[in-house]
């Protein structure tokens, strides 16, 4: 199945683009009557579709119109190559009606797809895409590069980012605080994305109430790979949970920023984080033994950690503030590492049996001790506190594709089931 087909299956339940009576389709491009997006933006309404031809566009916008769940406003690239919105030298200060990103989404139910964003700079937080109290924004098949921040902001309902590459964002003018993702709001879903090389911050930092990260490749930040931490009025609510499933998370060996941070869950601003970190079937690979794979930083924090691989460091879990509870089982870690309190059925060895670690092929050899060692039935609670069964059905295939995860018997540990093919 092609990646785009998989995305449509997921996204269809959240937003549809059924055109109501009076909806328009606008076509923008160098060879068309509408050569720029600017004349279209003030006219947008629910159900409208904007198709943009390949080319380089030197424009930035605030989008204030509202779509609906049944009639989203769709803005998409129309050709094989993505149209590029390049903000080099443009004003993204955020003052008044000036956006603080190339696309600043303020309305409800937008779908942004197959577009490239680059070079948004204002000194500290010029973003490729900024969500400003949006509702149900979907960002799909886009790239965001060389901005102060990649994607930033929050959604009042659910922000979904899928099949995107977010990379090389950051600025030394805001060193340590400019990230590939910097999210807040109600819910944030990241699925099937390649997030890498955050230059002056973390790859995925979020203060949202509830977060789901499914089947992503997250690698090589300068400050930390995933940081779900406290957010004012958001994470102090019960069930401020984080679910990470089937991700490959890798750190580089030569950070000049934080040398230990990898996945940090809890609080850092003096607020609170009342929730559970669920880690299921992830492959975690440290580029340095100084990495601490999981840090819990809140007295209200909980963690459920199952079916993962922790390789490259012996420091699996550190509790900076004693959490309420930690439960872990069926994880692989080095024989030299001490299993954290609360862990059972731990699998150990000298190496987990990757096909080719040097080439970052983290699929498993048939001889791997990780094969058929996982716990078959796992559950999690969503941001509303509803208990849900875990459905583990995909692998991430480099680059920007997902393939079915075919499983017979107990699941293998980590992000890949034995025999996963990168050629399907």
Image (cartoon, helix red, strand yellow):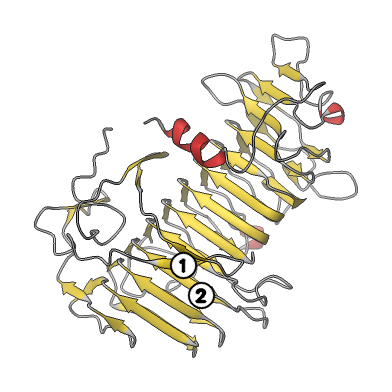
Question: Can residue 358 be seen in this snapshot?
Answer: yes
Q: Which dot marks residue 229?
A: none
Q: Which residue is mark 2?
A: 276
User: Residue 114's image quarter?
Assistant: top right
Of 371 and 146, the residue lying toward us? 371
Q: Rate crowding at label 2 as few (under 14), some (14 to 19) or many (20 or more) other CA atoms within 10 Å.
A: many
Of 158 and 192, the residue lying toward us? 158
Q: Secondary structure at mark 1?
A: strand
Q: Nearer the viewer, mark 2 or mark 1?
A: 1
Q: Which dot marks residue 380?
A: 1
Q: Rate crowding at label 1 as few (under 14), some (14 to 19) or many (20 or more) other CA atoms within 10 Å.
A: many
Is 232 situated above or below 101?
below
Callout count? 2
User: Residue 332's image quarter?
Assistant: bottom left
Residue drawn at 72 percent across, 50 percent down: 131
Which of pointers 2 and 1 lies earlier in the amino acid sequence?
2
Residue 28, given in percent of the width and then of the height, sits at: 72, 18
Cβ–Cβ under 8 Å for marks 2 and 1: yes
Q: Secondary structure at mark 2?
A: strand
As drawn, is 306 to the left or to the right of 346?
right
């Amino acid at each position: 199945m092609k990646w785009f087909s998989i995305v449509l299956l997921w996204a269809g339940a959240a937003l549809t683009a059924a055109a109501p009576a009076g909806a328009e389709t606008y076509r923008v491009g160098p060879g068309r009557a509408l050569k720029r997006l600017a004349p279209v933006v003030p006219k947008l309404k629910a159900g409208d579709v904007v198709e943009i031809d390949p080319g380089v566009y030197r424009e930035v916008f605030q989008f204030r119109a509202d779509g609906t769940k049944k009639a989203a406003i769709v803005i998409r690239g129309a050709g094989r190559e993505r149209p590029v919105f390049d903000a080099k030298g443009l004003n993204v200060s955020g003052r008044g009606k000036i956006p603080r990103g190339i696309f600043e989404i303020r309305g409800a139910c937008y779908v942004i797809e197959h577009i490239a964003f680059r070079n948004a700079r204002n000194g500290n937080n010029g973003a490729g895409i900024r969500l400003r109290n949006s509702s149900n924004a979907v960002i799909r098949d886009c790239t965001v590069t060389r901005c102060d921040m990649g994607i930033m902001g929050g959604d009042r309902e659910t922000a979904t980012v899928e099949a995107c590459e977010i990379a090389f964002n950051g600025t030394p003018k805001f060193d340590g605080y400019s990230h590939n993702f910097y999210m807040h709001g109600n819910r944030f879903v990241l699925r099937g994305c390649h997030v890498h090389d955050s230059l002056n911050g973390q790859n995925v930092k979020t203060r949202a109430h509830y977060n789901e990260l499914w089947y992503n490749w997250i690698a090589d930040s300068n400050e930390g790979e995933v940081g779900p931490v406290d957010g004012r009025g958001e994470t102090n609510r019960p069930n401020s949970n984080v679910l990470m499933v089937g991700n490959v998370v890798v750190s580089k060996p030569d950070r000049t920023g934080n040398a230990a941070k990898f996945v940090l869950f809890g609080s850092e601003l003096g607020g609170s984080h009342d929730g559970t970190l669920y880690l299921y079937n992830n492959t975690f690979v440290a580029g340095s033994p100084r990495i601490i794979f999981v840090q819990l930083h809140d007295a209200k924090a909980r963690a459920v950690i199952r079916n993962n691989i922790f390789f490259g460091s012996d420091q699996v879990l550190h509790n900076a503030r004693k959490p309420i509870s930690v439960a872990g089982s069926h994880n692989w870690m080095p024989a030299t590492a001490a299993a954290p309190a609360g862990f059972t059925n731990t699998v150990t060895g000298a190496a987990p049996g990757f096909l080719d670690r040097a080439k970052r092929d983290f699929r498993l050899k048939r001889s791997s001790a990780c094969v058929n060692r996982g716990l078959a039935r796992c559950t999690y609670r969503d941001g509303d506190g509803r208990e849900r069964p875990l459905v583990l059905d995909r692998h991430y295939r480099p680059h920007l594709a997902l393939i079915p995860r075919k499983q017979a018997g107990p699941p293998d540990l980590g992000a890949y089931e034995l025999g996963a093919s990168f050629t399907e």
